[in-house]
Amino acid sequence: MGSTQATPGPPAGGPAAQERQAGGTPRVALAELLAGNRRFVSGQPMHGHDVTAAAAASGDQQPYAVVLGCIDSRVPLEAIFDQTFGAMCVIRTGGHVLDRAVRGSIEFAVGQLGVPLVMVLGHERCGAVGAAVQALRSGQRPGGSLAHLVDEIAPAVVEAGLDDPAVQPLAIRRHVGRTVRALRHDDLLAGPVAAGRVAVVGGLYDLATGEVALLDPP
Ligand SMILES: [Zn+2]
């Protein structure tokens, strides 16, 4: 048994992943997520989405973040955070609107999988927010379940000021903030959030640069 052979190699995923497993704190999870975005922006992603990554993550899952984003095709969440299989749970709805299924999914990730970080990610020129602005300006509420999206986004548009020329970008930020606050007060999330075991943060994605900026730094 030579000492060289007994020396373990670097852990898979690097030092951040090692600390993440040991601590599982919101702070470490957020640093990991933002580091992934910087790798993506710099054009030097670490992770590829091939079958070897799928196989490597095929055992038990230990994700460290939940990201709730929009369905927008220009905002693929695993790609923009340079995350591999098994690293994060992704939920996407139009305008990252909450409903019971979304809340239940986040509660599952936090309560059953021990995820310490929830990020709500909005983005520029969000079509769902645009639809809410249009519905309020025209007074015509859309039919079907699209009405649910508009109804959930409408308060942020009103807060931003319907007559403001910049209502849409302002409403996007307001809507992220409102979604973050709603999750912080969720029945099953409020306790872990108050105890500091879980953080819910808001972010905004820049379509042109690929950068994620925190809207409400913890
Ligand atoms: Zn959108």
Image (cartoon, grey):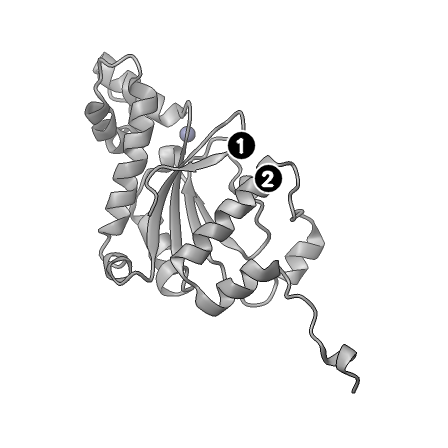
Instruction: Name the residue located 28 percent from the left edge and 48 percent from the top edge.
Output: 183
Label 2 sits on a secondary structure element that is: helix
- Using the image as rendered, state which of residue 215 and residue 111 is in the foreground: 215
Badge 2 or badge 1: first in the primary sequence: 2
Amino acid beneath label 2: Phe
- Using the image as rendered, state which of residue 159 and residue 218 is in the foreground: 218
Instruction: Name the residue located 33 percent from the left edge and 62 percent from the top edge.
Output: 197
Residue under pointer 2: 40
Position of residue 163 in the picture relative to residue 22 (left or right): left
Residue 5, quarter of picture: bottom right
Q: Quadrant of the N terminus?
A: bottom right
Give the CA distance from mark 2 to mark 1.
7 Å
- Contact between labelled residues 1 and 2, with CB atoms less than 8 Å apart: yes
Image quarter for ligand 1 equals top left
Q: Is residue 65 visible?
A: no
Amino acid beneath label 1: Gly
Vertically, is 140 above or below 16?
A: above
Residue 216, quarter of picture: top left
Q: Position of residue 134 (x, y in %)?
A: 29, 16
Residue farthest to the front, as pictured: 3
Q: Is residue 201 visible?
A: yes
For mark 2, does the 10 Å Cα neighbourhood hold few (<14), some (14 to 19), or many (20 or more) residues?
Answer: many
Residue under pointer 1: 210
Q: Position of residue 189 (x, y in %)?
A: 28, 57
